[in-house]
Image (cartoon, grey):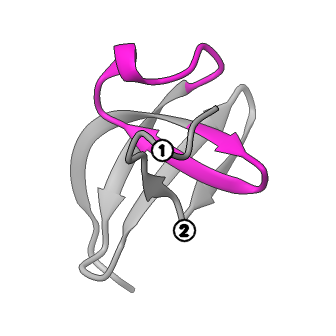
Amino acid sequence: MPSYTRLPNVFAWEDGGQWYYVQDRTAAPPAAVEVRCFNDGTANVLAINKGTSGAFVRDALPWSGASRQ
C-alpha cells in the first residue's frame, strides 16, 4: 500500500477528456472545482468529491496556460 503525502488543495477541471489543475483559483475556469491533492511518491493524485460519489484522477496535468480555452 503506497504512502500518500497531502499537498495543498488545487482547482481542477476536465477538458476534452484530460484533467488539468492550478493552485490559483483566479487562473482556473469557472467550472473548476476545489479538490484535494496527494502525492504517492511517483505522481500527484487528485481526489474529487461530488456529494456521495467521487473519483481519483492520476493523470491530471498542471495547467500551463496554453491548454485552457
**Mark nearer the viewer, 1 or 2:** 1
Residue that carries the numbered disc 1 in the rendered image:
66
Q: CA distance from mark 1 to mark 2?
A: 18 Å
**Residue found 60% across the figure and 13% down from its top:** 30
- Answer left or right for 18 relative to 33: right
Query: Circle 1: is it few (<14), some (14-19), or many (20+) Cα within 10 Å?
Result: few
Query: Circle 2: is it few (<14), some (14-19), or many (20+) Cα within 10 Å?
Result: few
How far across and how far down the image is residue 23, in percent?
29, 33
User: Tag 1: residue type?
Assistant: Ala
Give the number of marks. Answer: 2
**Residue found 52% across the figure and 47% down from its top:** 20
User: Tag 2: residue type?
Assistant: Asp
User: Where are the magenta residues, as a range?
Assistant: 13-32
- Answer left or right for 1 relative to 48: left
How far across and how far down the image is residue 52, in percent?
75, 32
- Answer left or right for 8 relative to 55: left
Q: Which mark is residue 59?
A: 2
**Residue found 44% across the figure and 61% down from its top:** 45
How far across and how far down the image is residue 44, in percent?
36, 64
Q: Quadrant of the N terminus?
A: bottom left
Q: Quadrant of the C terminus?
A: top right
State which quadrant residue 14 falls in.
Answer: top right
Q: Nearer the viewer, residue 67 or 49?
A: 67
Q: Which mark is residue 47?
A: none
How far across and how far down the image is residue 28, in percent?
47, 24
- Answer left or right for 55 relative to 28: right
**Residue found 59% across the figure and 58% down from its top:** 56
> Does residue 4 belong to the magenta stretch?
no
